[in-house]
Amino acid sequence: MKNQIIKPKTLKGFRDFLPQVMMPREAIMETARRIYRSYGYAPIDTPTLEHLEILTGKGSEETDRQMYHFIDHGKRAVGMRFDLTVPLARFAAQHIEQLGTPFKRYHIANVWRGENTQAGRYREFAQCDFDTIGTTSIASDVECVLVINDLLRAIGFQAFTIRINNRKVLNGLLEKFELRDKSTEVLRAIDKFEKAGREKVVAEIKACGGTEAQIDQILELVAIKGRPSHVLERLGELAQGNDLAELGFSQLSELCGLVKQAGVSEENFSIDPSIARGLDYYTGVVFETSLDDDPGIGSICSGGRYDNLAELYTKRELPGVGASLGLDRLLAAMERLGMIPAVSTPADVMILQFDGQYLGHYLAMASELRKAGLGVEVYPDAKKAGQQFKYADKRGFQACIVAGETEVESQTVQLKWLQDGVQTEVDVSQGTTALVNALRQRIDKS
Amino acid sequence: MKNQIIKPKTLKGFRDFLPQVMMPREAIMETARRIYRSYGYAPIDTPTLEHLEILTGKGSEETDRQMYHFIDHGKRAVGMRFDLTVPLARFAAQHIEQLGTPFKRYHIANVWRGENTQAGRYREFAQCDFDTIGTTSIASDVECVLVINDLLRAIGFQAFTIRINNRKVLNGLLEKFELRDKSTEVLRAIDKFEKAGREKVVAEIKACGGTEAQIDQILELVAIKGRPSHVLERLGELAQGNDLAELGFSQLSELCGLVKQAGVSEENFSIDPSIARGLDYYTGVVFETSLDDDPGIGSICSGGRYDNLAELYTKRELPGVGASLGLDRLLAAMERLGMIPAVSTPADVMILQFDGQYLGHYLAMASELRKAGLGVEVYPDAKKAGQQFKYADKRGFQACIVAGETEVESQTVQLKWLQDGVQTEVDVSQGTTALVNALRQRIDKS
């Protein structure tokens, strides 16, 4: 039976990450951590498995249906987390006295949803969330925009738009029209605008009790486009006469002013009254972020402000604001935009095992180069040079170091650049400093 | 029902990571990634869930019993991975043609075991594995020792011992004594030496068919201690007369020579013939690593060479060698050794929101400082200064920046160091360069 081969395969909706994809994936997560930390967001982690009642507490029918859940060894009903928000709520309710407020955290981890696998959706995917909880301050709202801006720039994007809205404006307008208790239905109708057309949307809002004039104003509100100053002016007019809408408008004005003052280019943010982001969860500012060069990919970083994070688990009111980087979408966009190099090694330099008797020499040289901060692989077998170069080329090393008997005796090495085949002899009789410099000169530039 | 509070709690055997613990945890994982990469090990990831038959393929009764498994939405039997070795075997079998050999990968990810939660064991824990597969080269064996050495030094340890053995020596000796097919039983007996005493071990090996003289030699072998040169000398004598044992001995000699030549201090490695590491899996060199200042914690980085990684999933023979960093053990040791600072913010500097009207000024200043590479949090609310300082102190910020009306008008800030209360006025009329320098001077040193 031992020779019966089990076919190696992954589950439907799950995937392996090979080095070429995993390297940029890790690089983005590292950039996210670095940027989040630079604002004082601290890392946390929570268990993959939670008591099922914790996870279903706030779930919609859809998330409940998609959740992976089972009975564990101790006969407990358990589930795998389907997002990082429910665990944050449970975590905050449990530890907030110890943590104190304001509490700023980031959480980069996988979540699981047994959803339909069509359209490039996966059943296991990473989320990269950051939130500030325990404060209603606009400073925390502004910071979300700053983080998104810094993060996308650090990843390598210049052409992106952080689209900002405040739910209070539309909610206030609906309040004014006595449609507030129908807001879910109205928002659902508005969401269909692009697909179903105006007529259908008007009919649905009418069914909720809206008049023609009111519907005109609602649809005008969500359609306002243009420069922030223009959008704010029209928003201000439409918000007039309702406290909530006016509050939303003034928060939005203040936010835009502060975002600009903190150094975000006006090219990179806009006010977009069409953004709603979830039907009930968000109650103040909301964000979406699109890539100007690949708008079809959808929002790659979204979030907003909520009034009460953890009401299911504690009586303590915990308002907050945060956003989440959509790692998979971002990577898909980067792949389409040619931002992912065809490299499958994290090291830049390979030392050939040109002659097996000098293995110790190669290993010692590699150690020296690593001490200088370079990534160096020593080819493990003393195979033919051609085979070793082929491997180096396939993996995407930038440079190879070759030292046979002649070089070892004359205390030199041959340094060969794979992209153009340029080869130079480098003296190593005084140590590896000259070699490090020669390597740095081209590696840093590429 | 909405007001019914669900008690926030984690599952037995699972845990939340609060910032103070998560920060060093992330730091170690980042160090591991950096060191692995510097040797050309490339990152991969595999799904948390696998087809159950993949996971049970090689499992012992114990791992099978501990595995989290269930039936998914599509009626498939699935399990959560309980280590990173089985997924690597499945991954390699599936992709090795595309990847090519030698293939060096690292994998840092969580695994799950529903085991007894006594003695600080958790049901979800991280593994940090690195392996080179597709080669039998000693270069790859040596590299494992170099990686462990670099990794522990980079984390901050100097006093550690990488204990090295080669399974072939004992296996050869057993072959010579015609006890090779009883090796599992003999190894199990030897493992009991410290707890059960010599007499019990002798009785068990006798039951396997060993003679008194043979048992003496076996027990002498596993008890040899001392300087590498001394251990090698005795090993060489005991290995004589059996090809496998002699091969193991010569590999061990060569390995030690190369490890030393590649720059590992003789303080940091030893030959320890008592190490077996698993009963059948490893077939050549094996490693364990102990901390000299906390030997009781056990091995914090272990591994070895195996002949055929993926025999269950492919007919292609894939030899390899690798090791795994025990993150939880290492962190427990660091906590005991006082290496974990009482800090729960990743940022060093906090700007007080001393006067709400200057929020934009504070946010802009924070942006400037971040551009210079500093981590800066702006306190979100314009609360009393005392309250903000208290927060800064609790979180562990090193420095606070205060600017009220006087400072804003005179283009200065007050810079206060929290550890000793030292406060200086810094001119910011020419930009933040002077402030950055003042901050760097002390932050870099602490």
Image (cartoon, coloured by chain):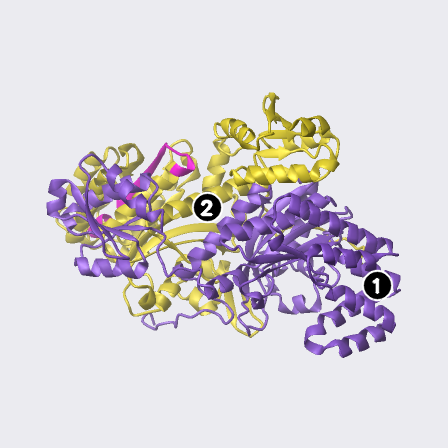
Chain colours: A yellow, B purple
Location of mark 2 (residue): A29
Front residue of this view, candidates A385 and A69:
A385
- Estimate how packed mark 2 is, as few (under 14), some (14 to 19) or many (20 or more) residues with alpha carbons within 10 Å: many
Label 2–label 1 contact, CB within 8 A: no
Residue at image position (21%, 37%) is: A231
Q: Tell which subunit mark 2 falls on.
A: A
Residue kind at label 1, given as amino acid type: Leu
**Residue segment shown in magenta:** A154-172
Asked if residue B184 is positioned above or below residue B159 in the image, the reply reads: below
| Separation of residues labelled 2 and 1 (CA atoms) | 50 Å
Is A220 on the left-hand or right-hand side of B370?
A: left
Residue B174 badge:
1
Q: Nearer the viewer, mark 2 or mark 1?
A: 1
- Residue A62: x and y in percent read 45, 58
Q: Tell which subunit mark 1 falls on.
A: B
- Estimate how packed mark 1 is, as few (under 14), some (14 to 19) or many (20 or more) residues with alpha carbons within 10 Å: many
- Residue A250: x and y in percent read 17, 46
Is B47 on the left-hand or right-hand side of A9?
A: left
Residue A134 seen in the figure: no
Front residue of this view, candidates A368 and B307:
A368
- Does dot 1 land on a helix, a strand or a loop? helix
- Residue B155: x and y in percent read 50, 53
Is A424 on the left-hand or right-hand side of A197?
A: right
Occupied quadrant, residue A388: top right
Quadrant of image for the N terminus of chain B: bottom left
Say whether mark 1 and mark 2 are on the same chain.
no
- Residue A138: x and y in percent read 23, 50
Residue A138 seen in the figure: yes
Q: Is residue A160 magenta?
A: yes
Residue at image position (67%, 33%) is: A352
Q: Is residue A317 magenta?
A: no
Asked if residue A9 is positioned above or below residue B8 in the image, the reply reads: above
